[in-house]
Image (cartoon, rainbow, N blue to C red):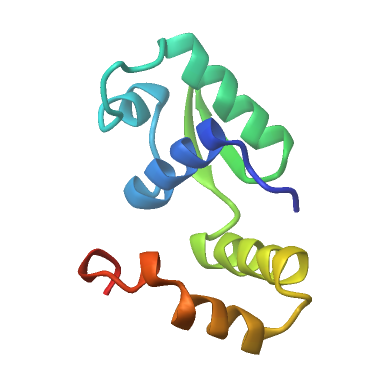
């Protein structure tokens, strides 16, 4: 598994939320300025090549659905962050969050 780009992650967040859908269904919840239909279609096909998404065909239309769960991806990303920034130490991660004043605001509690 590889980390997703920001655009890929945005599409995956939507797919995880709606569980399955066509490109138009993924465009709907996106914030303005919304990307072009073709842009989202390209991103979904890239996600399919990366093994995150699959589809069911209805003629020329494709209904997409995630094949990597949000929990699986979250675990992967947290482990990657833990390895890359905290020497694989949960204790160091915990200390970072405990001691970083900018993260100890009401917004994050």
Q: In the image, 32: left or right of 39?
A: left
Q: In the image, 41: left or right of 22?
A: right
Residue 104, image x, y percentages: 33, 74
Rendered residue at 23%/64% (across/down): 107
Quadrant of image for the C terminus: bottom left
Residue 88 falls in which quadrant of the image? bottom right
Location of residue 107 with respect to 96 vertically, above or below: above
Q: In the image, 2: left or right of 98?
A: right
Q: In the image, 24: left or right of 8?
A: left
Does any portion of residue 60 appear in the rendered image?
no
Residue 12, image x, y percentages: 48, 43
Residue 48, image x, y percentages: 65, 35
Residue 72, image x, y percentages: 60, 66
Location of residue 60 with respect to 9 vertically, above or below: above
Does any portion of residue 93 appear in the rendered image?
yes
77 or 17: which is nearer to us? Answer: 77
Rendered residue at 55%/64% (across/down): 74
Residue 29 falls in which quadrant of the image? top left
């Amino acid at each position: 598994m590889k980390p997703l780009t920001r655009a890929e992650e945005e599409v995956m967040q939507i797919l995880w939320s709606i569980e399955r859908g066509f490109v138009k269904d993924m465009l709907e919840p996106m914030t303005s300025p919304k990307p072009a239909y073709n842009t989202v279609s390209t991103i979904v096909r890239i996600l399919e090549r990366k093994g995150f998404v699959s589809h069911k065909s209805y003629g020329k239309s494709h209904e997409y659905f995630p094949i990597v769960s949000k929990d699986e991806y979250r675990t992967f990303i947290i482990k990657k962050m833990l390895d890359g920034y905290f020497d694989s130490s949960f204790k160091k991660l915990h200390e970072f969050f405990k001691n970083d004043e900018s993260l100890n605001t009401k917004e994050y509690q």
